[in-house]
Amino acid sequence: MMLSRHLTLPIIIAASICAMPALAAESSYVYCDNGLRCFKQPCPSSSALDLATGKIIKGVSIDTGGLPQQDQALDLSDKLYAGKIVVRGSIERRTQTITGKDYTLSWLVATRVVRAAKDSEREHCFSR
């Protein structure tokens, strides 16, 4: 079966789009320690609330390495731990080796600090 010239280009374009890696969409998140403690890694002791969807991503770690310098200059550690700030970013799945075993874990890749979090946005920080 021979394809017509009219179909060849759309098929090539469609195949190229399908082969492209998916880009994670950015959203706003409230990241915090959720109070859970574990004896073994990986441990889901932190979570992030996606403000756009209301979904809570449990067991997520945060990568603040991509934040602008002015955001990195803030004392973020305590604010993130307590869920006091909203960060813009995306969720990525990364493979990490823990005690010789590979795990695919969720990471919130923060790109900027947006604002202070509202109390209602921090509620997931205290639930178990």
Image (cartoon, rainbow, N blue to C red):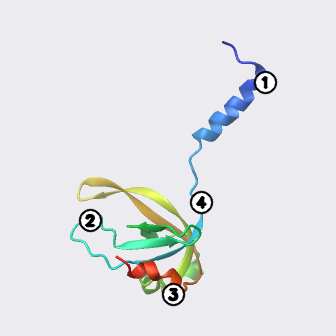
Query: How many angstroms separate mark 1 from mark 3 (CA)?
Result: 58 Å
Classify residue 8 by image quadrant.
top right
The reply, left or right, for residue 47 in relation to residue 113 is left
Callout 4, which amino acid?
Answer: Ala
Tag shown at residue 25? 4
For marks 3 and 4 on the same chain, the one whose residue lies earlier in the sequence: 4
Residue closer to the observer: 66 or 48: 48
Query: Residue 13: percent from the left, percent from the top?
Result: 69, 35
**65 versus 95 height, above or below:** below
Q: Residue at x 68, y 29 (%)?
A: 11
Quarter placement of the N terminus:
top right
Type of residue at label 3?
Asp
Query: Mark 3 — residue?
Result: 119
Q: CA distance from mark 3 to mark 2?
A: 30 Å
Q: Amino acid at mark 2?
A: Gln
The residue at which mark 1 appears reads as 6
